[in-house]
Image (tube, coloured by chain):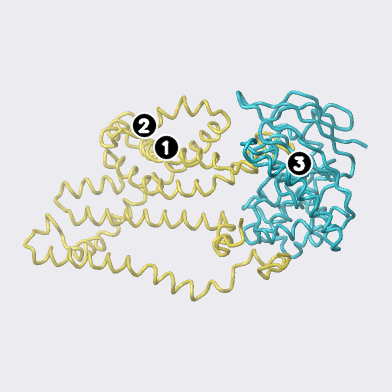
Chain colours: A cyan, B yellow
Amino acid sequence: MTRLELRQVRKRFGPLEVLAGVSLNVAAGEFVSILGPSGAGKSTLFQLLTGAEKAEGEMLFDGAPLDDHGSRFAFMPQRDALMPWRRILDNATLGLEVQGVPRRAARERVAPLFAEFGLAGFERAWPAELSGGMRQRAALLRTVVQERDMLLLDEPFGALDALTRAAMQRWLEAMWRRHHWTALLITHDVREAVLLSDRIYVFSARPARIVSEIKVPLPRPRTADASVAREAAVLEAGILDTLLGATDPQPSAQRRPKGDDHD
Amino acid sequence: MAVPSIPLSGGDTSGPSPRGGRSAVSSAIARAAPAAVSVGLLFAAWELYARYGGVRPTVLPAPSRVFGQAWENREALMDNAIPTIRATLAGFACSLSAAFLFSALVDFWPSLRRALFPLLIASQTLPLVAIAPLVVLWFGFGLLPKILLVALVTFFPMTVALVEGFGATEKEIGQMLRAMGAGRWRVFWLARLPSALPYFFAGLRISVTYAVVGAIFAEYAGAAKGLGIYMLNAKNNFRPDLVLAAVGVSAALTLVLFGLTVLVQRLAMPWERAAAERGGEGRQ
């Protein structure tokens, strides 16, 4: 069942065209990634979905126009956006608090999840006392407890070091296998997209169009055995080629050898 | 990554940390030592010059004389310090409330900033020497003109600090809160206000020193009692030792207020210390 559907969504900021007609859809329980170069307007798409910006084109959720933005999506911004003045427990309850859940009830709902998110014992810690990976898990915890219809993850691991990022990606995949959230992930990390997604939309450089839509048919977990990892690597290489071809600023000089490679 | 890098059990972090004891005290002494030495040297040089330099004590009294006279006149000094403290605190409280209200309004309606900031900046160019007697002329010798003058010198730095502090809110926190469905007031309360705290305290430390100076200036222009009028009288009686004694009292007062703001900041922002101990490691 299709939950989110975008039809020919366009957005320009003054003379700057950011999105040039983007159509995509996300089904219930599906993990979809938007993969594209930096500055391609991927984050703009999230701003449209969360209602921070208006655009042309149709945005439908469960078949109805998307107008009540707040109630559909739980949004996780690029950096963790934890409030340094709130303890981790109070950061985790933030979304519920905004929804009007009384503080005590919110805490009771959030507290049991700390163990699953690897944060047990850190309920009373300040964000500054946590490592980068833990902060990111706290941010995801804050996002999923809102129990919205869909998760919007905006480059959630972009600010982490490579090793932590790899660990977090595996962890997120494991979490997703258990919960089957409907999720839309923005990333410029090809490996991350292949590891986590059921489908990938590849964006061009600005103004963003969808260059290709790629199904990822690999079995999960995708890090478990070598044959899956090999298939993933092949898929990654193909996507990387598409991406580099689409963003290449001087097609005449450099496109040909790459094209040969691809064939 | 998954291994917690600092051993913490729930609830422990709120209590005072046990390692803050002796080493903190000795390191505080070590940090204060250079200041103590420089102040000591200054006083020693001053003492020597006043004693053996051939200047009359009615021109430049030695520090020993200043301290002696301060002790002898301690009752009069205290008696005059109290109205100054009262004026400082009352004026500062008024100024803080006004600055908070105004900066919040500016945060909600940024066009107010363009309308009123020029006026505020102009208010800062008024020479206190000229304006203080006028304010006393208009509002009499009571508490009101002192409050007004203290507010005049402290309102602007506090307002600027708060407006900048609200503006320093991390963009992504605001974006996330709006996506959660929070309205402007909610965003202000949950994110912009706490984000402004470090700026608020920076402004507070600066303006609390202005506040004492403002109160003394107001008294200098006319008051029944207060350190300002005490200084004026002492000067007119050719008693620079008593002027300096009063200056010493006002300096001590400023230092105490300054120390209080640092203390309040520590209590109000307990996460800052956690951040300092962690030292930014592991973040990004």
Secondary structure category for the residue under label 2: helix
Q: Amino acid at mark 1?
A: Phe
Q: CA distance from mark 1 to mark 2?
A: 8 Å
Secondary structure category for the residue under label 3: strand
Q: What residue is drawn where x is 14% and y is 57%?
A: B60
Q: Chain of mark 2?
A: B
**Badges 3 and 1: C-beta atoms under 8 Å apart?**
no
Left or right: A222 as drawn, with respect to A140: right
Q: Amino acid at mark 2?
A: Ser
Question: Reading the chain from its start, which is encountered first: label 1 or label 2?
Answer: 2
Residue tagged 2: B123
Q: How many C-alpha atoms fall within 10 Å of the one at disc 1: few (<14), some, or many (≥20)? A: many
Residue tagged 3: A34
Q: Position of residue B33 (x, y in %)?
A: 34, 70
**Badges 1 and 2: C-beta atoms under 8 Å apart?**
yes
Residue tagged 1: B156
Q: Position of residue A175 (x, y in %)?
A: 83, 56
Q: Amino acid at mark 3?
A: Ile
In the image shown, does B173 or B212 lie closer to the viewer?
A: B173
Left or right: A175 as drawn, with respect to A123: right
